[in-house]
Image (spheres, rainbow, N blue to C red):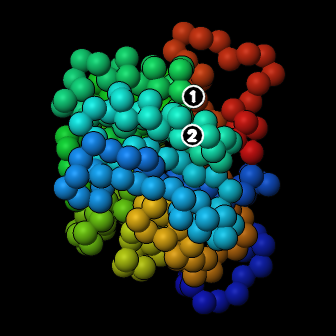
Amino acid sequence: MPLDGAPRGPGSWSGPGAGPGAGMGAGGVVDAHCHAGPADGLTDPWNTDAPLEDYLRRARAAGIARTVVFPAFDSDYRVANARLAGIVRRHAPRLIGFAFVHCRRDKGRIGDMVAEAVREHGFRGIKVHGYEAMLTREACEAARAFRIPVLFDVVGRAEVMDMIAPQYPDVDFIVPHLGSFVDDWRAQQRVVDQIARHPNVYADTSGVRRFDYVVQAIRRAGPGKVIFGSDGPWLHPGLELHKVKLLGLPPAAEAQVLGGTIRRLLARHRGGAGRRVPPGSSYGEALA
């Protein structure tokens, strides 16, 4: 059934992911993919600076309530994560921090870096970029320990998710750009298939220019497996948000894409390995 163009009423979605509790509630739109802050490189925009001023203004105008942020590319992610923590604090509670790790350069200290990011900085996920190094067991084990999602850019190598996802069925993986920022249709088609097959694999919409692949992802995997992201500050969050609006989803399904699913994944966080969550606390409510 077509997703774009035809008007729909509440509850009309009947594909995968439909059912009770599918809506997002009153939490508002969450952008699940944004870089933030300066970095120590000077060769490309993504390793020089990711200024948030224009992004935040544009996001507010578009109706985006919360944003997941992680550092730009940097030569020392422990330092970059600490720098990001200051940005998150200054904009509290607007921003949600993810710790960036380099799976080769940070080998042997990833667990400590993630523990510091979660316990000291209040971060809620891990970012790994395959352009630098592919995802490793060390990073997956850290995600498992804290029950936090991993946003892993496979840089077109979508096939690795078929090895990773079954090895860590209790870890949630988000593949940005449907697998390729550079429009590798083979990778994007494979990710569409993966999010339909693997319960713990999701995809975000950031920078996906082939609109019908987003349509296919919703049709095959359901709205609960596709997450809105903008790849800000360099891509306009309002433009990326409008792409989701153009799908013409009914309210409950659209609410999942625009915040319901990422809130659910973040709510699984246990607050720190070996540390008990205080009675009566709710991480899902903390994100509302």
Could you say which quadrant of the image residue 173 lies in?
top left
- Identity of the amino acid at label 2? Val
Secondary structure of the residue carrying tag 2 is helix
Q: Is residue 173 visible?
A: no
Q: Which mark is residue 88?
A: 2
* 176 relative to 129, above or below: below
Contact between labelled residues 2 and 1, with CB atoms less than 8 Å apart: yes
Which residue is pictured at 74% across the width and 52% down the height? Answer: 27
Secondary structure of the residue carrying tag 1 is loop
* 77 relative to 35, above or below: above
Q: Residues within 10 Å of mark 2 (few under 14, many from 20)?
A: many
Residue at the top extreme? Answer: 274
Could you say which quadrant of the image residue 16 lies in?
bottom right
Q: Quadrant of the C terminus?
A: top right
Q: Could you tell whether 45 is left or right of 170 in the image?
A: left
Please provide percent x and percent y for residue 133: 19, 40
Q: Quadrant of the N terminus?
A: bottom right
- Identity of the amino acid at label 1? Gly
Q: Residues within 10 Å of mark 1 (few under 14, many from 20)?
A: some
Which residue is pictured at 63% across the width and 44% down the height? Answer: 91
Could you say which quadrant of the image residue 253 lies in?
bottom right
Which residue is pictured at 53% across the width and 41% down the height? Answer: 87
Q: Could you tell whether 28 is left or right of 170 in the image?
A: right
The residue nearer to you, when weighing 138 against 187, is 138
* 274 relative to 1, above or below: above
Q: Which mark is residue 122?
A: 1
Which residue is pictured at 19% across the width and 55% down the height? Answer: 43
